Amino acid sequence: MKRLFRTLFAAGSSRAVPPLVIGFFFILYIVVAFFTDETLITLIAFTRRSLILGAILALIPLNSAFRMIRETITFLGMRGALSGKTDKGVMGMFDEVVELSVPATTPELVNRLAAAGYKTRRSDNYLAAWRGISNFPVRLLFLAGTFCLFTGILITTTSRSSFRQMVVEGEPFPTPNGNGGMVERITLEDSQGYVLRRNLTMEVATTGSGSGKRKFGLYPPSRYSGTFVYPRYLGLAGQLRFTAPDMPAGYEKLCYLNIYPPGKEENVVIPGSPYRIIFSVPEPENLSERYSSYMSDKISFRFKLLMGKDQLFTGTMTEGVEFVRDGFHLALPDVRRLVVTDFIKDDGVLFIWWAALLFAAAAVLWLPIRGIFPRREMLFRFGQGVTTACSFAEGEARKHAGVFHEMLDLVDLKRDERRGMREES
Amino acid sequence: MATLLKLIPHLFAWFGIVLIMLRGFSGRRSSVMLAGMIGFVIGVTGTFILFRSYPGSVTFGVVKSVLGMSFILLWGCSVVAIYRSTDRAKVMSWGKRLIKTPSTAIIASCLAGVGAGAVCTCRLSAATTDGVAMASVLLLLAAGAVAYIALAFEKRMPEAFKVSPAGMLAIVTALLLFSASSILRLDLFSPLSMKVMKGVHDFVHQFMESILIPDHLFVRSYIWKTIGLLFSKEVGFWGGMVIWFTPAILIVLAIQFERLPAVAHIRQGAQRRRVLVDAIRARRYRALIPVFALLLLAAATYQSCFPSVEYWDPKPLPVTAGSSGEIIIPKKGEINLEDGKLHKYIFRQGVKEARFFVLMTPAGELTVDLDACAICKPDGYGQAEGSVICYYCKTLIPLETVGKPGGCNPVPIPFTENGDSVVVDGLTLINSWSATVQATARVKEGGK
């Protein structure tokens, strides 16, 4: 059982796992590309539906977790060896290990190592020397980032659900689980930020169930009842009133018009009739601000009235003012702002954000550690006339190896001196 | 004779393949030579039979797929090489043991020969329609002579010049891709860049939606323009370059990262340095081959971007619609619509205009299509070597599939044949053009 566990752990923590899994998905991507132009979307859909593909993708976060354990064990083992406690199982992790059949004289070694900039620790049977900072914390950050990234991708791919709703001023805040508080105000303002040029705010009133007043912005998106509120597009909602010569009873309905930015068209079909109306907001004269009309009191609409494929006429109308021509009456008496909003249930997003932070931290730390203070270690163990010397370097390996070889020469010099003394005696 | 002259770059590639195989499997010259030649004969005859059995684009597709697979294999091996060279564990893998077996040498040489032979036969087939059998026999004789010269040359090369297994795979694949890049229908780089462009577009779109990035109307324009760069055609080219060159670069790095031999047991400093210097020199020699592979891949990219093929791309002739709104184009007359060539026209209606072409497919059917596809910007099509090419993304569309919708194929337009003329509805044409151009312009602007 223990052997099986060790084998599984060794396989799961192998460095080969991530490239193999990524390579597998890459080849799958190529195969899918032969059959469809929507390759990535199709591959995501396959992974969502297939348990096997999900399990294969899950190997990467699992591998990262195993590697964190493995590298921690190795790191602690190396630390144990350097502090003279144990060297069990870690000798293989050193770059070079050599045995010399001569006992060492530690004071000389310590002096030479100190002169080369190494700190030392010694006892009767060992001497450890080191300099620089270990890469281990950075590796942990990197592996944790990989874990979070691929866990996030896995969760997003397999369990994300999205519901598109219209958030309208004066209407209850719609959520997948039912309606929330009343939407009091929707505002669009200029932003002073470096990334966002506008701030969009949706203010929702207190609900009867006890939820307090809430404000929803753009980024980072707020959560409401376990879903992210992700504003997508702007629009207008209006009570449309339409009568035609052959429709004296007329037609009245609340219409959601996804017509921002100005110029974007939305089609409203009048049911049971050949009529349809295409609405848009006219381009402002000053093209630098295409969204100013969104916050204005009276909004102008451009429209085209069509009967079948034929265009009857076009015109411009203002909110609250009725348009009349040739027996046709058209009015939008009450226009309110709306935001086309996606309510997204996806816990993977949090993992992806964490991954970005961890990767950034790892990169910031790695650069100076690897470039200026790489960890270099030496260990000399003495016992029964034999010195075992080990060397390890995370960077500047050639320079470190030079110092290590010099130390070995120093140890070996003692053997020559002793041999000379024996021959003289 | 002209056809045989066109084979020179391919025979040069074959020379290189034989030379590298002989040096890479240096203890098994005779078996490598024999297996390579047998492979070449199989490649030539197999491709020749395929061309006879399946005229059209099938054979090119098969050979192109084989080349694609060899490139994927190179990618896999390069990743393994870099992982192994940076691993602290010093164990001999089963892969290394496998490379040293005689059967590996024979199979690898044979496969390389098959690839080289197939590419050469595609060149013959693309260049000439008559006398392919005789040309194939001449090709086999020439390939035999080239292999013999390579054998003689290899024996005179210095012993210090060694080839690593990964380096061998890199150079052989690079030689095959270089050889294939001069044949329009075997070129891999252009379709790769197109797929990368589409892949990056999809990935960026999905990524932004995944982490809930606000839409362009809320984001500062300079940031959106920067993101917009990821949707451009250049991303396809540079992304393709990265994928194209990375395996060879990884192999160079793997050789550079190889651990130097342990010299701690040597007590003479001068001897230690000697061992290290020799190891570093040997490492540099081994890196020469993948560096040369990089140069060959660069040459293949150049041939792909600036092909020596001249496209048939006639200037669009203006046409007008009659009172019924129909455009009538006679099949014969000044222009023969049934000659198998692309015939381009331009139709103007007020301020709107639409470009389209008429073509007789190899199946003998006329087709009318927009001079634009549903994916790319409407840069139009040219015709060469049994296919039409989309000028925007450089995708080759076999003539057999022109008239079928989807992908980068030209958008087909409904038409009727009325005796000696082709009849197209002007309004349908204008509407179809407007819908296509608007849709592709929106995609290329990077709108979500």
Image (tube, rainbow, N blue to C red):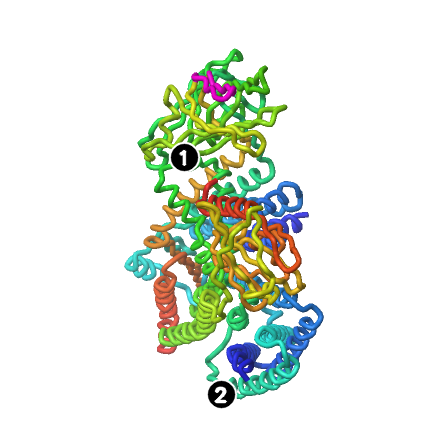
Q: Which residue bears the numbered disc 1?
A: B217
Structural crowding at the residue carrying mark 2, measured as other residues with C-alpha within 10 Å and reported as few (<14), some (14–19) or many (≥20): few
Give amino acid for label 1. Leu
Q: Position of residue A179 (x, y in %)?
A: 55, 18
Q: How many marks?
A: 2
Q: Which residue bears the numbered disc 2?
A: B156
Q: Residue at (43%, 56%) from the top-left corner?
A: A125
Residue B384 in sight: yes
Q: Earlier in the sequence, mark 1 or mark 2?
A: 2
**Picture quarter with the N terminus of chain B:** bottom right
Q: Is residue A71 left or right of residue A405?
A: right
The foreground one among B429 and B127 is: B429
Q: Is residue B181 left or right of residue B103?
A: left
The foreground one among A339 and A216 is: A339
Q: Are marks 1 and 2 on the same chain?
A: yes
- Position of B375 relative to B157 (above/below): above
Callout 2: SS: loop
- Position of B15 relative to B396 (above/below): below
Instruction: Identify the magenta region.
Output: A320-333
Q: Is residue B412 left or right of residue A397?
A: right
Q: Is residue A332 magenta?
A: yes
Task: For mark 2, name the chain.
Answer: B
Give amino acid for label 2. Arg
Task: For mark 1, name the chain.
Answer: B
The foreground one among B249 and A360 is: B249
Q: Residue at (58%, 85%) from the top-left corner?
A: B142
Query: Farthest residue in the left direction?
Result: A115
Q: Position of residue B384 (x, y in %)?
A: 54, 67
Q: Quadrant of residue B270?
A: bottom left
Q: Which mark, residue A330?
A: none
Q: Residue at (46%, 38%) from the top-left corner?
A: A354
